[in-house]
Image (spheres, rainbow, N blue to C red):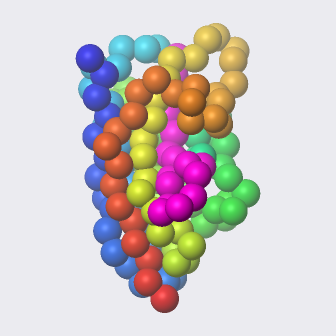
Amino acid sequence: QVQLAESGGGSVQSGGSLILSCVASGFTADLWCMGWFRQAPGKEREAVAIIANNGNKKTAEGVAGRFTISQDNAKKEAYLQMNNLEPEDTAMYYCAARERAFASDCPTRGAEYAHWGRGTQVTVSS
């Protein structure tokens, strides 16, 4: 059974930084995508950043230049470095994972991810 465990959330002031970590267990895929999604109260879930086992990554336009996704392929872990946080970044952040086919791109729709963590809260105060 695949399990994803997020950590690293917390409360920071505007301009602060946080690093989120996602550890996957029971996830045996050799080709995979892992990503960070977030959902703020009253808003739809949105993709923040996605990364493949080969290092290809996608970052949402609204966080590009502030957030950086990275991964440890051997450990099947993904990280999200968040700098210059803004109150608008306040949300529950979820890690998601899925297998991918050879030469395929990683999707950004959450519905296409089979495995999800429970989330970690990020709160940014002004």
Q: Residue at x 57, y 58 (%)?
A: 43
Asked whether residue 84 is in view, the answer is no
View extreme (right): residue: 61
Residue 109: name its quadrant. top right
**Rendered location of residue 71, percent (x, y):** 46, 39
Res 67 → quadrant: bottom right
Q: Quadrant of the N terminus?
A: top left
Q: What residue appears at the point 57 percent right and 73 percent down from the top-left corner?
A: 88
Residues rendered magenta in the picture: 31-46
Q: Magenta span has 37?
A: yes
Q: Is residue 43 left or right of residue 123?
A: right
Looking at the picture, how far across and down is residue 54, in whole percent?
58, 27
**Any magenta on residue 20?**
no
Q: From the viewer's perspective, is 2 left or right of 88?
A: left
The answer to whether residue 25 is left or right of residue 107 is: left
Q: Does 98 sit above or below residue 77?
A: above
